[in-house]
Amino acid sequence: MTTQPNATTIQVLMVCLGNICRSPTAHGVFYKLIQSNGLEDNILVDSAGTGDWHIGESPDARAVQAAASRGYRIDGLRARQVSPEDFEMYDYILAMDRTNLRELKNSCPDAHQRKLQLLLQYATAENESVPDPYYSGSQGFEQVLDLVEEACDQLLQHIKAQHFSAQAAD
Ligand code: 4NP
């Protein structure tokens, strides 16, 4: 069974508040999944924050360390703020929590509102939001990874099913 991509490239934007803890984690986790599925040419992922406080900064050191301990390298990412062009460019704009989602909804043109979702809509976990770990201890960053890993796995299955035809080839 091989996955036969059509000509589409699907673009995914992970969004949190500062773009230094949750969304870079989701970015790194989803990127690794894309790589391990050989879909680098078909699915692109980026991340951004609704806020501007951390523009240009590396991810929080605690997020970098927690991610590294599970095999995700996110230290090369740099924070940026969501821009108006993102609403045009991305196919899936996935917020980490309801506050991020509300901010996105307030600035997104009507034509692109359907792209806005909570990342955890793709998870079976009870949480609908990825809790902000910024003021928490290391356990908060582990919880972020637990939630994000499950959601990213299901997000990839969803994108494959929706946008790439799976046909028996052998
Ligand atoms: P993030 O976490 O939204 O997951 O990147 C935060 C980072 C920074 C702040 C809040 C949350 N802050 O208040 O600076």
Image (cartoon, grey):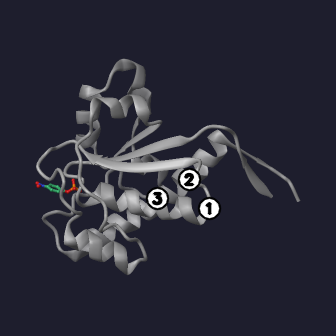
Find disc 1 in the rendering and name its residue.
Answer: 37
Which mark is in front, 2 or 1?
1
Question: Disc 2, disc 1: CB below 8 Å?
Answer: yes
Element carrying mark 1: loop
- Tell whether label 3 touches label 1 (CB within 8 Å): no
Disc 2 on helix, strand or loop?
helix
Q: Which residue is disc 3 drawn over?
A: 30
**Callout 2 amino acid:** Leu
Mark 2 vs 3, N-terminal side: 3
| Residue 87, image x, y percentages | 36, 30
For marks 1 and 3, give the CA distance.
11 Å
Q: Quadrant of residue 1?
A: bottom right
Give x and y (percent) for residue 33: 53, 62
Give the Cα separation between the discs numbered 2 and 1: 9 Å
Residue 122 position, x and y percent, is: 48, 50
Residue behind label 2 places its C-beta within 8 angstroms of ligand 1: no
Q: CA distance from mark 2 to mark 3?
A: 8 Å
* Kind of residue at disc 3: Phe
Q: Identify the residue at image location x=48%, y=42%.
A: 11
**Is ligand 1 less than 8 Å from the beta carbon at label 1?**
no
- Above/below status of 3 relative to 142: above
**What residue is shown at x 47% (from left), y 54% (from top)?**
123
**Quadrant of the drawing holding the C terminus:** bottom right
Residue under label 2, please give it: 156
Image quadrant in which you'd find residue 136: bottom left
Circle 2: is it few (<14), some (14-19), or many (20+) Cα within 10 Å? some
Q: Earlier in the sequence, mark 1 or mark 3?
A: 3
Q: Quadrant of ligand 1?
A: bottom left
Disc 1 marks which amino acid?
Answer: Asn
